[in-house]
Amino acid sequence: MEPGPTTPVQAGEPTTAEPASASAAPPLQPSLIEAYEQLESAVRRRRPHDDLSSLRRAFDFACERHSKQRRDTGEPYVTHPLAVAQILADMQMDLVTIETALLHDVLEDTSTSIDEIKRLFGDDVARCVNGVTKLSKLKLHNKEVREAESMRKMLLAMIEDIRVIIVKLADRLHNLRTLDALPR
């Protein structure tokens, strides 16, 4: 269910719909540019010879698609995928995983299609973004399924790429880190 005016929004979820048009995206705030530069610097330290143009494209795409969305804290929504990407860069994850982090909410929270992700960012990123989206939609109700071992087996059977779970864990970590900023 998409958040709307009468739909409750969970902590960290975007609070508005996708922008009506990509050209309506406002200029980036200096703090977002600075956060991206820190991310790129962290990636470059570990991969000094890699072409990071795809990382910048993923950041720009996420900024465009989330441009009208805000977190419950009031800050631009794109701060969340950027923070998730930074967590993964600090863990020395590969570029596909970091790009997936930047894009992890675009399928669920915007009108972006998996085909568009595949065309713009390649099969690996598209597969991981799609996996994170599917994992986000998974609702566990059965008490036995919630038990750790059963859940681990089920997740590993569902997920083709372990990077999907790593991105989802970083996503949850950032949401937990920012809970104290929410109104009580």
Image (cartoon, grey):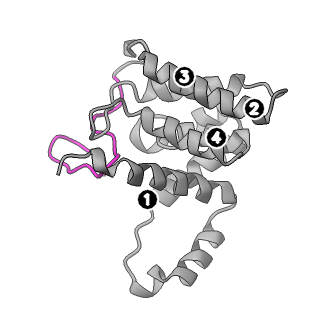
| Boundaries of the magenta span | 1-19
Along the line of sight, the residue nearer the viewer: 5 or 163:
163
Along the line of sight, the residue nearer the viewer: 70 or 137:
70
Which residue is at 78% across, 24% downward? 51
The residue labelled by disc 4 is 98
Amino acid type, residue under disc 4 in the picture: Ile
Q: CA distance from mark 3 to mark 4?
A: 14 Å
Residue 159 location, quadrant: bottom right
The residue labelled by disc 2 is 45
Compared to 37, does 97 lie above or below? below
Q: Secondary structure at mark 1?
A: helix
Q: CA distance from mark 2 to mark 1?
A: 35 Å
Q: Are marks 2 and 1 in contact (CB under 8 Å)?
A: no
Which residue is at 59% across, 23% downward? 37
Residue 19 x, y percent position in the rendering: 35, 24
Q: For the view shown, which residue lies furthest in the left direction?
A: 6
